[in-house]
Amino acid sequence: MLLAPFFVLFAVVMVLPIGYALWLSLFTEKQSGLGFGGTETVFSGLGNYTAALGDAAFREGFLVLLGYCLVYIPLLLAGGLGLALLLDSALARARRFFQLALFLPHAVPGIIAALIWVYLYTPQLSPVVKAMEAGGIGFDFFSPSGALPSVVNIALWEWLGYNMVIFYAALQAIDRSVLEAATVDGAGAWRTAFSIKLPLIRASVVMVALFTVIGSLQLFTEPLILNKGTGSAVTSTWTPNMYAYTAAFDRNDYGLAAAASVLLALTAALLSFAVTRLAGNREKKSKERKARKERTA
């Protein structure tokens, strides 16, 4: 009975919309006659899926996502872990202040954050760009080569502090006696961090990596804002999510938009499975190595 409200809400906001998207992806609208009649909804089977996969713009969106993930995910995980380890170290001072300062950008809504950075990227307005130009550094944040780093920077600014807090909380949960024992055995700060702390928070790292992969595939808000009136190389179909949005609300092709969304969801599910499976295999191998060492000892 206590779980019933959750399952009802889950069915209403998750299961039913997903089912409706699957149903919608199987139909398309066509005009009757010579185009002078009304439109009618006809069953197209997998036609919308083949149309989406056959569209070069949709496929290129996945290439953009691939480049984004290869840059963003390692920087986010390494940066969050590095900051959390620094705050957890004995040399850290003013921990509360730095936690709040680093977490604060996450409290800013994504649209507002993107608008702030668009202002900072615009040459005619940005004091940052002017300072870079004064120092002899020229970089166009809206160019084809600068668009991806610009989006990665916005996402890092938003999410780095949030993941740092998760890692820091996991580090605080480590039994202090384990760290004291490592210190007594002669382990330095680096050895303690990489050989003791990181293995003990592996579950948190896997969880953050999983959520980051899913969130990266849903990239939408930041490039959408960059696309609006900035002369940016970010197009209306720059990512699969933007492709689906454009198909639905600019071209009124809801069947194609639903098919693109389903394909993106399947990709996210496969990558999530791969991340969890890889983490599970590493955990299993680690336990096997530990068991062999204990038997040898």
Image (tube, grey):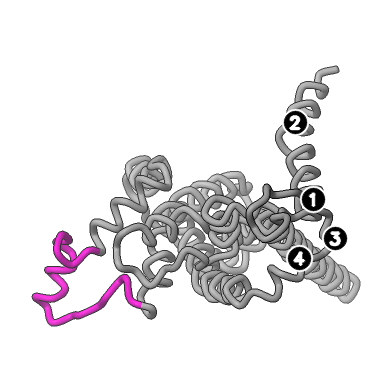
State the CA–CA distance, disc 2 to disc 4: 25 Å
Q: Is residue 178 left or right of residue 224?
A: right
Question: Above or below — where is 198 with respect to 11?
Answer: below
Closer to the camera, 160 or 140?
A: 140
Determine which residue is flagged by label 2: 12
Question: Above or below — where is 275 with respect to 13?
Answer: below
Number of callouts: 4
Of mark 2 and mark 3, the one earlier in the sequence is 2
Closer to the camera, 3 or 280?
A: 3
State the CA–CA distance, disc 1 to disc 3: 11 Å
Of mark 1 and mark 3, the one earlier in the sequence is 1
Q: Quadrant of the N terminus?
A: top right
Magenta stretch encompasses residue 156? no
Amino acid type indicated by mark 4:
Tyr
Q: Looking at the image, is mark 1 or mark 3 nearer the viewer?
A: 3
Determine which residue is flagged by label 1: 22
Q: Looking at the image, is mark 4 or mark 3 nearer the viewer?
A: 3
